[in-house]
Image (cartoon, rainbow, N blue to C red):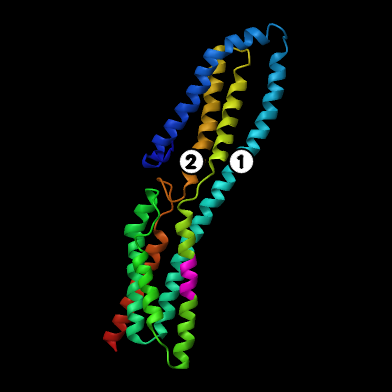
Amino acid sequence: MDFFWLYDLSLWQVYSIIFIAFSSFSVFGYILANKPLTRYFHSKNIEVNDVISHFTGIVGIFFGILIGLVAVGVWENYNGCQEKVDAESGYAMSLYRDCSGLPFQVSREIKNDIKNYLKNVIKKEWPQSKKGNIPIAAIDDFNKIQYDLVSFNPITERDKIIYKLCLDKFSTLAAARRERVYSTQNGLPPIVWAVTIIGCIVLIGITWFFETDARLHIIMSLIVGILLSTVIFMIVSLDWPFRGNLSIDTGAYKFTLDRINETEAKQNLFQLIK
């Protein structure tokens, strides 16, 4: 069973589900388990609370380090995916500019291919990514760029130099696309989630051993639920960078497409004035 359906919900709905799950487990677990546990342990040692406090501190440090590393790893992965998106859009813009030095007909075809590719990445591939599917809707447009490039046969030395530059740029663009597509299928391994959830259960379960005022204990259980659910919510939201309401958007591609349209508009205006 997967929990990808969470990414179809709003952020508040996701947080509410996680908070209710942790808080309910903490509070109802205390109500059910506290009396049997305290009756057995506290009847033998009046200093059990001190022992539990010490042990809770040790477990808390261990779990804090663990969940901190997971959170940092998820954040770095999210930023890494954003960098891949920025790189791909930047390489597309560079190829668009470099191919301007090729013969007009060839250059026009490649430029149109690049624009179509960017448009379909925005309109078709991003919805695929948000649904968890492999984004391949723009692959035909990408292959069209390659076809128009390799179909050109440079003759002059100038064309050969520019042509090689364009091929190198296209290879870089292809690598960036491959990394971005592959990243849409990357999330935390199940073993990491298992260890994290077990750590949360252990940390909450330890609190059931304390003997204290019931109302105070319930309030403390809710506070623990808030803290744990907030951290887990952050990890869930950033775990799959291309899914959910906190997913990476198409801003980089739109920015590149806008710069291309602005460049063409200025060129057309210059030609009219000329």
Q: On screen, 68 above or below 76? A: above
Image-quadrant location for residue 92 = bottom left
- Point out the residue furthest to the left here: 272
Image-quadrant location for residue 14 = top left
Position of 176 compared to 272: left or right?
A: right
Q: On screen, 6 above or below 26? A: below
Residue 68's label in the rendered image is 1
Is 170 in the magenta?
Answer: yes
> Which is nearer the N-term, disc 2 or disc 1?
1
Q: Which quadrant is the N terminus positioned in?
A: top left
Name the residue type under label 1. Answer: Gly
Name the residue type under label 2. Answer: Val
Position of 149 compared to 239: left or right?
A: left
Magenta-colored segment: predominant secondary structure: helix
- Count every numbered label the image shows and give the total: 2
Pinpoint residue 203: horizontal percent, then vertical percent: 61, 27
Q: Nearer the viewer, residue 78 or 178?
A: 178
Position of 12 compared to 75: left or right?
A: left
Q: Is residue 215 visible?
A: no
Pinpoint residue 163: horizontal percent, then vertical percent: 45, 83
Q: Which quadrant is the C terminus positioned in?
A: bottom left
Image-quadrant location for residue 150 = bottom left
Magenta span covers which residues? 169-175
Pinpoint residue 197: horizontal percent, then vertical percent: 55, 32
Look at 61% across and 41% down and name the residue there. 68
CA gap, disc 2 and disc 1: 14 Å
Is 70 in the magenta?
Answer: no
Label 1 SS: helix
Label 2, on which residue?
Answer: 236
